[in-house]
Amino acid sequence: MHQTQQRYGQMLNTPISFKADGGLTMQHKTDMNLGLRNVWEVVCHDSKGKEKWRELNKNLVTTEGLNHVLSITLDGGTQITSWYVGLAGAGTKAAGDTMSSHSGWSEITDYSQSVRQTLTLGTASSGSIDNTASKATYSINGTATVAGAFLVSDSTKSGTSGTLYGAVDFSSSRSVISGDTLTVTVTLTAASA
């Protein structure tokens, strides 16, 4: 009986015990969940190719982003097949942010590319996928302060539509000037915790 108890408990990830009166007691673990985590690495090089600074930070997945994942995975929602990386200024990113409403921060558009850069992902493996082979690259053409980045389904610079999947805050605001180049690597992970 004890081996059966252990086996079922492991399959259910639920501790099972038998009471002296023959009853069955099950305790359900409530700490099981799926965690979505994204890690951003943003590197700035000057006009001569020398590294000026580097940021490595974890992403906030917005409520809108979480709802999108649930909808397409479990409720027959429409998949978004194109995602874009944007640059953000100073200010706090919040779970309730959307592209039409993110009062805590603004978008930085001081780069020569005409649109936000495409997120080109490789193949998912072991619960992780990234754009290491095709990093988002920005040619800075002005003086600005970059303090984060975001992932959205619309490529329009300063656009206010599209699904905002997530945003990242740097540990501190970073200055860029004309001639700098920013490269952005995004690693998206999903893991059972």
Image: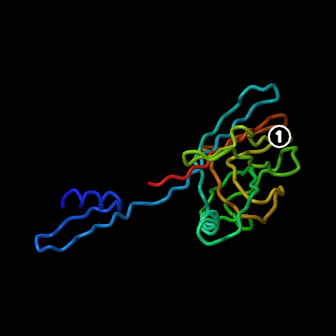
157 left or right of 76 in image? right
Seen as rendered, the residue at the extreme left is: 20
Q: How is the image coloured?
A: rainbow
106 left or right of 172 in image? right
Counting labels gives 1
Nearer to us in this view, 67 or 88: 67
The residue that appears at 39% across and 61% down in the rendered structure is 31
For residue 23, above or below residue 34:
below
Identify the image quadrant of residue 94.
bottom right
In the image, residue 100 lies at what x, y percent? 74, 67
The residue that appears at 67% across and 48% down in the rendered structure is 148
The residue that appears at 24% across and 60% down in the rendered structure is 4
For residue 154, above or below residue 52:
below
- Bin the neighbour count of mark 1 within 10 Å (Cα to Cα): few under 14, some 14-19, many 20 and up: many
Q: Could you tell me the amino acid type at mark 1?
A: Ile
In the image, residue 152 lies at what x, y percent? 73, 58
Q: In what quadrant of the picture does the C terminus appear? A: bottom left
In the image, residue 133 lies at what x, y percent? 72, 37
- Name the residue that disc number 1 marks: 140
Nearer to us in this view, 168 or 13: 13
The residue that appears at 71% across and 30% down in the rendered structure is 52
17 left or right of 10 in image? left
171 left or right of 50 in image? left
Q: In what quadrant of the picture does the N terminus appear? A: bottom left
Mark 1 falls on what kind of element? loop
Identify the image quadrant of residue 143.
top right
